[in-house]
Image (tube, rainbow, N blue to C red):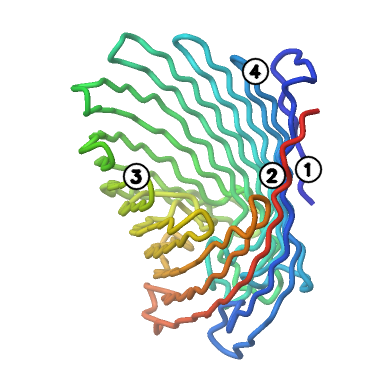
Amino acid sequence: MGLGVAVFAGRASAEPWSIEPSAGAAADYESNPGLRTYDERAEEHIAAILDVPLRYDADELELMLRPSGRLSNRAGYDSLASNYVHVDAAAQYTSDRSSATFQTELARDSSLLFIGPDLNGLGVRRDSASTALDWTHLLTAREQLQLEASWSQVKYALPQTAAPYLVNYRYLSGGPTWSVSATERSTIKFNAVVAQYDALDGITASRSYNPQLEWVRQLTEIWSLTATAGYARAINSEKFYFGPFFLGSFKATENSTTYSAALARRGERFNLSATASRALAPTGFAYLSQLESAGITAGFTQSEYWDYRLNVTWQKAVNPVSSIERTTQHYINAQIAADWHWTPQWLVTFSLGRVSESFNNSEAFALPTTSAASNIGMLTVTRQFLRTDL
């Protein structure tokens, strides 16, 4: 189970502390929740959902500890509807010219939520821990400097029947960002990120460098555009052994352009965002994976009782399973949802969705492409409790 880490930055009186929990129940049907390429099995689930955010708000300091989880009538982690436990903690300090943020998370969930059926359709337990630090300082009225650092570690409970593709790993990244307001509506940013990716078995590792240039433009009062372009270079290494004897290391360089673009509309009743990106990211394989993604998210508020959401995400991942072998995965997740605000405290959500994937188990050996998909229908009832000051 996840364990909470409370964050304290000085003494605080009890008056600013508050809690605003929510609890609910969900019923869902999924045609292939394990994303199996064969022997598909439909499932129905009933689950309890709990979210308990505990907050501290003062003039300059904010703290949060947020346990959340899902407990269903199905045990295990071999399904898209698997149980999960997350514990988030955060602290933010703000002064006249600077701000500092600390975030941490411990989680237990399913690998299917992150890598799909690359383990022959078998989901496995995924235990993760992460920490991020951020410090921002206003240099002048137009310039600011930001320093970021993050650490994460992921471990998988691999069954003996699964292909040994996934590795337990540790990922460390950080770097500075300098930004300047070119005009009242435009901001230019430059950042450089250095990252180290290590398999916990000590066999494979990857060091990457990624400088990027970013442009942020407020097009109108409701439309904004963010565009980033950069270049990533990764140095991959793999150690080879014959029994207990170390034979040497293999090293290779991987180069890739990186980019991201986001067009967003923020209105009173209708919101829309469209995104596209390419990056080197940790996904649990031998080295960093090259991820390309695109998505559209829309939301419409009809009245104080009804609002609607649409989300479509496409992703392509090139996953290195060794120094010479890679797998390619295409992923599409589409969902439509309607929220009925029965009362100010009660929310009923209806949603329909489809998750589909196609993947090539080996580019080196030209194996055939296989695919899996699941149709999903869900009804969720949530009770939002009023804020209680402690």
The percent position of residue 121, horizontal first and vertical second, equals 58, 77
The percent position of residue 96, horizontal first and vertical second, equals 47, 9
Mark with earlier residue (3, 1): 1
Q: How crowded is mark 3: few (under 14 residues within 10 Å), some or many (20 or more)?
A: some
Residue sticking out furthest to the bottom: 39
- Give the residue displayed 44% in from the left and 49% down from the top: 281
What's the distance in space between the residues labelled 4 and 3, CA to CA?
Answer: 29 Å
> Is disc 2 in contact with disc 1, using a CB cutoff of under 8 Å?
yes
Eye-nearest disc, 3 or 1 = 3
What's the distance in space between the residues labelled 2 and 1, CA to CA?
Answer: 7 Å
Q: Which mark, by number, is residue 106?
A: 2
Q: Is residue 230 left or right of residue 144?
A: left
Q: Quadrant of residue 29?
A: bottom right
Eye-nearest disc, 2 or 3 = 3
Q: Which residue was labeled with disc 1?
A: 3
Eye-nearest disc, 4 or 2 = 4
Q: In this view, does 116 lie above or below 129?
A: below
